[in-house]
Amino acid sequence: MYNTSFIKKILVAAIVVFSYSCDKDFNAIGDDLISDDHFGLESEKYNVVAFNQEVTPIQSNALADNALGIYENPVFGTTTANFVTQVTLANYSPSIGESPVIESVVLKIPYYSHPTEALTEGGSKYELDSIYGPANGKIKLSIYESGYQMRSSYFDNGSQYAQLYYTDQNALFDTYKVPTLLNDAADVTQNSEFIFDAAQKVDVTVDETTKVETKNYSKPEMRLSLNKDAFKKIIEAPASKLSAADVFQEYFRGLYFKVEKSGSNPSSMALMNFSGGTITITYKCKTDSTADAPETTETRTLVLNLTGSTASLLQEEKSQAFKDAITEGNINRAAGDERLYLKGGQGSLAVLKLFDPTDVSSYDSNNNLVNVPNGVSDQLDEIRHNFKVKNWRINEANLVFHIDADKLTALGNEEQVKRVYLYNLTNNVVLADYSSDGTSAINSDPKSSRYIFGGMINLDSNKRGKNYKIRITDHLRSLIKDETVKNVDLGLVVTQSIGIVTSNILKEKNTYISQAPRASVMNPLGTILYGGRVSSNVPEDKRLRLEVYYTKPN
C-alpha cells in the first residue's frame, strides 16, 4: 500500500495539476503549487520546537475500533485492553413463545481479515489484520454480564450533558460485573487460552430428507459458546422488559470483556469492530398453533446486537524509557526534545511550535528592520517581509519526521505506525491542507485517503520505516498573508484512520492539551521520531525542520 506504483504516481501528478488549475485565489497572486521535483525553486529551512506531552486518561466511549487483549511492546511497555458494551435486541417486543428452553447461546464478533488463497476443500485461507504481538499469542479471556448501567447522557442543574467514559475506568466495571463467567465452555481456547484464530469458520447443515451435508464458509471471527443459564433472564423476562431499548438496557446492562495473562504464554491484541457482533439465543418453545398437540415444540432464535454505549478500558505499564521521556520534569519546552515519543491509546503526542522562538526585532510600517520585539518569531517576521516586499511566493512547505530506527529495532515491520496525523492543537481542528486535499483512498483502503496531505510511512529497502512527510503549504500561506493570523501550536499523533478527526476529552486537562484526536485513542502502537532540537544527539540530516520551497523573482 505504501510503495506507490507508476500508475499511482501518474494519478498523483494529475491531481496536483488539477489542484493547480483550481487554485484561483493563489493564481491571482502567483504563489501556486507546482510539481514535486522543485526544479528551479529555492528552499529555506526553519527551526521547529517540538516536545513530548503525555496523554493522561482520556474519553474512550463510542470508538469505531476497540482493542482487546494484551500487547507487550518492547519499546513502550505493556497495554492491557478490556472492553465494555451495552447490547440491544435486534427486534423489540419479540414473541418468545411458551415454556422456552435454551439450546445454545453463541457470541460472534468478526475479525478484520483478508483472504490470501483459495483452499481446494472450499473457502479461503485468511490473514488477520490489526493483530499485535505473536500470531499464536494467548490471553485469558473472561466475559461477564455488566452490572454497571451505562448512560448516554445525564442532567445537571436542568442541562443535559453527554455521559463520557474514560480509559482508566476498568476497576469500575470490574467491581460491578456479575460474577458468573459467561464463556465457561470446557474448551480452553474459548477462555483461559484464547487465541485470535485466523482460520475460516465452517458450518455444516444436513438436509433432513436427503441427509446431504452442505458446508458454509465464513470469515474468521470470535465465536464463543456462552452460559445458557445466564441468559434465561432474557427469554423468561416479563414482556415489558423487552419492549424498548432503554428499559432492556437497564434490565440487561451489557457485556464486560476482561483479559489477563494466560500463564507464561506470550500475549496478543486485536483491534475489533464490536458493533458488528451478535449474541444468538437458540431455544425451543411450544408452538403458537392451537391445532398442534400441546407438547409440540419449535425452534426459535433471539438475536442481540453488541451496540449501544461502549468504552475502551486501557491499563498501561510503561517502559522506563518511555516513562522518562514523557515525565513532566524531563520535557524541554524551550529548546525542544531530542526524541518525540508518539503512542496511541492512553499514551503521548508531540507539540510543535513552528519557527525559532527568538523575538528581538520586527519590521516597522516602512518595512525597515528595527530592534523592537513584537511577540512574533523573528523567522516568521522575515518570511512575511519577504512575501510582502520581495514578492517571494511559497510553492510548497513540508515537515519531514525522521524515525529513530535504532530505538525501534525491537519492533517488527508489522508493528510500525503506518500513519501519523498533524493538526491544529490550539483549536483542536484540522489544518487547511487536510481540508483542501480531496484525494481518495489507495487500493480501496479508506485509511490511505488524503495522501497529498501525507503522514503515511515511507519505507526503506528492508521495509523498515524511514520517515513521515506532511504538507502544510496552505497552512503556511495563510500564516504569512495575514499578519493577524496566530501561529498556533500543532499536534502530532499516531492515527488509526485519517478520516476520523474528532477529538476526545482528557479526564483532567493540563496546560497544553485538553483533548486528543479520537483516532489516536484507537491505535495501540507507538513510534519514536527525531525532534527539532539542535543537539549532537540529533543527526543534522534527521533533525526536524520546516522546509519551504519558494519562487523568488530575479
Image (tube, grey):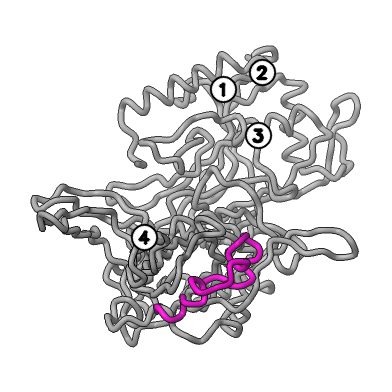
Query: Front-most of 402 and 181?
Result: 181
Q: Quadrant of the N terminus?
A: top left
Query: Front-most of 505 and 320?
Result: 505
The residue most toward the front is 291
Whether residues under marks 2 and 1 lie with C-beta atoms below 8 angstroms apart, the answer is yes
In which image quadrant can residue 6 be found? top left
Q: Which residue is mark 2?
A: 26
Which-is-in-front pick, marks 4 and 2? 4
Whether residues under marks 3 and 1 lie with C-beta atoms below 8 angstroms apart, the answer is no
Residue 68 shows up from this direction: yes
Whether residues under marks 1 and 4 lie with C-beta atoms below 8 angstroms apart, the answer is no
Inspect the magenta stretch and tell me whether residue 21 lies in it.
no
Q: Position of residue 370 (x, y in %)?
A: 87, 36
Q: Which residue is mark 4?
A: 291
Residue 176: numbered disc: none
In which image quadrant can residue 72 be found? bottom left
Q: Position of residue 65 (x, y in %)?
A: 49, 57
User: Which range is magenta?
Assistant: 227-256
Residue 33: numbered disc: 1
Q: Residue at x 26, y 55 (%)?
A: 127
Give the Cα separation between the discs numbered 1 and 4.
Answer: 79 Å
Instruction: Identify the amino acid type marked 2.
Output: Phe
Inspect the magenta stretch and tell me whether residue 244 lies in it.
yes
Secondary structure character of the magenta stretch overall? helix
